[in-house]
Image (cartoon, grey):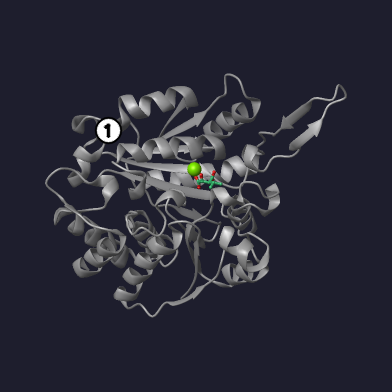
Amino acid sequence: MKIAVLPGDGIGPEIVAQAVKVLNALNLGISMTEAPIGGAGYEASGDPLPDATLKLAKESDAVLLGAVGDWKYDKLERHLRPERGLLRIRKELNLFANLRPALLYPELASASTLKPEVVSGLDIMIVRELTGDIYFGQPRGISKLENGEREGVNTMRYNESEIRRIGRVAFDIAMKRNKKVCSVDKANVLEATELWRQVMIELSADYPEVELSHMYVDNAAMQLIRAPKQFDVMVTGNIFGDILSDEASMLTGSIGMLPSASLDENNKGMYEPSHGSAPDIAGKDIANPLATILSVAMMLRYTFNDEANAQRVENAVKKALAQGYRTADIWTEGSTKVGCRAMGDAVVAAL
Ligand code: IPM
Ligand code: MG
């Protein structure tokens, strides 16, 4: 088993170091090789996705990624910015299925800004399409109109096969859960998502046991806050999934708790926390490493088919929380505030 480890920028290196520590503690004989991406890639070789990094990622069974981005790169040309590196590696590896589980650990019920009774028992799987939509659609760009004013253009587009393959992922996951899929679109306004809805309905014929519902994205944003426990699996496009997964993360107390898996057709995957690089707290040893550690659990489950060790890691996280350890983002009165490294140590000790 070969893993490419791409720490990236900001808090990326410190959270990834904790996840690597957990992987080493499992003693599975996994070989890990590090390479730069994002701003770190730009610094190393003038490219947010250096050729050597992409090659390593392609040759590995899985990729463990920290986060990319820093304000200091915002002035670079768009193709050199850290985010492009992330979007390109997703596209190059064909990682079209992004799984973002929003799960509330009972210990953190009081860390959420929502009332405990609204969120307790929450367990949602957001399935976000990751290689299409307005993120990649052509035409795009900023150009000058004839009258001299500038115009920005992006294009939302989805073809049938792209919709069908992400739909299948969502239905298959629902079959292993509570057999409910809520497809989120804006079919009342956007044709691209009108097609999305039609294809989801066609696909549901193959899954008679799964209850399919549809929701407009504005309503879904509201329902996630009003009554989040109505959801089991949510499936949606790239841009809506980006926004709704950040929203869902707050139901769990902190975005620092939300892992993710991005998979191709063969379950090769890239695993990363759903949060960003948080340059404002980088290097201060206060970031929450749990989303990254939980991403390792997803790696064991989805790419290495090792459910037992996936659960071991998840149980170790639960134990560290039950023991009262909290990073600053999830800290509440009466618990023990720890830094990033100490949280990693607590999980390793619990293992
Ligand atoms: C995410 C992030 C990325 C995205 C950014 C960093 C390009 O917000 O993974 O959700 O928009 O997909
Ligand atoms: Mg996002």
Which residue is found at the position 57% from the left and 51% from the top?
72
Quadrant in the picture for residue 230: top left
Tell me if residue 208 can be seen.
no
Q: Position of residue 175 (x, y in %)?
A: 38, 45
Q: Residue at x 14, y 49 (%)?
A: 335
**Quadrant location of residue 123?**
top left
Establish if 196 lies above or below 322: above
Amino acid on which disc 1 is placed: Thr
Q: Picture coordinates of residue 233 (x, y %)?
A: 39, 39
Q: Residue furthest bottom?
A: 29
Q: Position of residue 194 (x, y in %)?
A: 60, 26
Q: Which residue lies at the image location 65% right of the left edge and 66% below the top edge?
A: 50
Extreme-left residue of the structure: 334
SS of the residue at dot 1? loop
Question: What residue did someone put label 1 on?
Answer: 113
Q: State the residue lying farthest toward the top.
A: 188
Q: Residues within 10 Å of mark 1 (few under 14, many from 20)?
A: few
